[in-house]
Image (cartoon, rainbow, N blue to C red):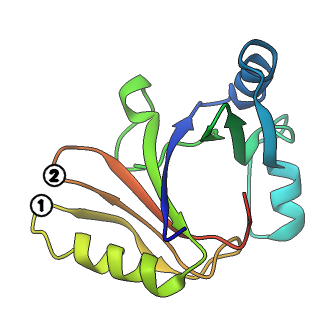
Amino acid sequence: MSFEVIPFLSLNGHGVEAISFYEQYLGAKILFKKSYKEMKDMDPQFNYEEGQDDYIAHSVLQIGANKIMIAEEEMDLTRPWQLSNSSSLCIQSKDFSRIETIYHALIKHNQVHILTPFEKNVFSPGYGIIRDPFGMIIQLTVTKHDF
């Protein structure tokens, strides 16, 4: 697999409920799930409000032959959360150079906006977010996982 494109849903506090719904009604299998509390254990700089321990920092579900990702926060922090700002595409691969090449190709376009520069973070050796000319948010992730 060179890379894959996965729909990413940002659910503004309804991630746990959505995962449960997809498990019950679509037979979803949880491939990966990390709560805010677990994220704070990984990264002491990660902050969240009281009562949000169980909020979803990141998850990957298998539904049939496809995957979806679910988290709580919107990817475009320049706009307030709303239904139209609650989904994105996630392009991921274990191949760092492949994801880095795609990122740099995208940002050459003068109507692509960099929302998060491509760099290492606590969960990925390479991660960035852009908004394409059509308003679609695209996350680019070098993954360490086999899901």
Quarter of the image where the C terminus is located: bottom right
Residue at the left extreme, as displayed:
110
Instruction: Give x and y (percent) for residue 56.
Output: 74, 41
State yes or no: discs 1 and 2 in contact (Cβ < 8 Å).
Answer: yes
Name the residue rendered at 63%, 77% in the picture.
121
Residue 114: name its quadrant: bottom left
Image spot of residue 119 (x, y percent):
50, 82
**Residue at 34%, 74% in the rendered image:** 103
Residue 41 location in percent, x, y? 90, 64
Residue 82 location, quadrant: top left
Residue at 81% from the left image edge and 40% from the top image edge = 30
In this picture, residue 98 sits left or right of residue 141: left
Which residue position is annotated with label 2?
Answer: 133
Question: For the residue labelled by badge 1, is the local secondary structure a helix, a strand or a loop?
Answer: loop
What residue is drawn where x is 70% and y is 23%? 18
Q: Position of residue 63 (x, y in %)?
A: 67, 31
| Amino acid type, residue under disc 2 in the picture | Pro
Circle 1 sits on which residue? 111
Q: Dividing the picture into quarters, in which one does residue 72 lie? A: top right
- Residue farthest toward the bottom in the current orientation of the protein: 97
Quadrant for the N terminus, please: bottom right
The kind of secondary structure element at disc 2 is loop
